[in-house]
Amino acid sequence: MTDIANAVGAALRVVDEHHPPDSEPPLCECGKPVESYSHGETTRYAAHCSECIARQDAERERQEAEERRREIEERWFEEAGIRPRFRDSDFEGFAPGPNGKVLTRCRAYAEIFEVGQTSTGLLLHGPIGTGKTHLAVAIMRTLHLERSTEESWDHRPSLLVNAVELVGQIIAAWKRGESDPALYRQARETQLLVLDDLGLEVDAEWAARQLYELVNYRYECRLPLIVTTNTAIKDLTERLGARTISRLTEMCESLKLAGKDRRVERRVRERKDPA
Ligand SMILES: Nc1ncnc2c1ncn2[C@@H]1O[C@H](COP(=O)(O)OP(=O)(O)O)[C@@H](O)[C@H]1O
Ligand SMILES: [Mg+2]
Ligand SMILES: [Zn+2]
């Protein structure tokens, strides 16, 4: 076999008595004639016409690119602490409802954010299920999946941590004799931290000090912070202390979400209209 015949191997077939070399080439399933390659006594025909082959190649390339993109996304979701429920949370999927202005502000924030430059953050507050975590994830998605190259994050991509879990991990680490667990270190150093569901921490006074240290460190380093909370500022101040809250309000633009709990609404809809 010649090199060219080897190279196109699977796509070619040897002509048989139905297709003697001097007859019309066989047709592709689309009706167009296929390419033929003659060498010596043998003529080989491509299995498809060149248009169909080009289309199949393009489709395969598209699928491979999609697969690569999904792998990159998956790895990023893991590193960024984004759980499966929020992996589709983006701006396009956010129904503005009563929160159109907040949506616009969050989009603008994601558009103008510059790694190493932006030091202000957002304080997203409002009732449970109004889309605070969804919007925080949408900002992270825009920054990582649409706007940036990995290098620009200097190997410190943004991180979403649940405040209760963070405090839980600090306690667990202390019990093991470690003073500075990896998650806490990451939360301090990451370029953009999303501190999710602040205000529900157990073991209040101790937790409050850990959170103060985290917020204050980022404040002093001019590192931005997005906080989500359904606790009123007055109650946050009581639980976390005035120093932490004054840092937070200085660092963050406050955005208030309104509306009904989407999770409850969805359950009601599903019960009324079972799919
Ligand atoms: N405006 C919205 N449009 C579309 N989905 C929403 C909206 N608000 C919330 N959701 C969805 O409802 C669920 C609860 O939202 P979430 O962001 O967890 O609320 P919160 O953090 O305010 O408690 C999530 O699955 C989220 O994607
Ligand atoms: Mg939330
Ligand atoms: Zn064809």
Image: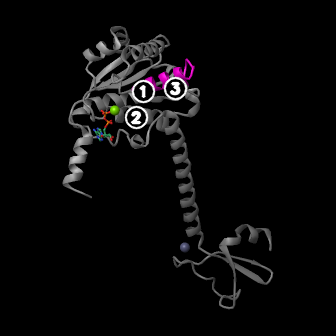
What predominant SS class does the magenta segment belong to? helix
Which type of secondary structure does the marked residue at label 2 adopt?
Answer: helix
Q: Residue furthest front?
A: 175
24, above or below 213, in the image: below
Q: How far apart are marks 1 and 3 (CA)?
A: 13 Å
| Residue under the image location 56 percent in, 23 percent down | 176
The spot of residue 110 in percent (x, y) is 41, 29
The spot of residue 129 in percent (x, y) is 27, 35
The mark found on residue 183 in the picture is: 3
Residue 241 in view in this figure? yes
Q: Nearer the viewer, residue 80 or 73?
A: 80
Figure quadrant of residue 93: top left
What amino acid is found at the position of numbered circle 2 in the picture? Val
- The residue beneath circle 2 is 137
What amino acid is found at the position of numbered circle 3 in the picture? Leu
The spot of residue 8 in percent (x, y) is 70, 69
Figure quadrant of residue 228: top left
| Residue under the image location 44 percent in, 17 percent down | 119
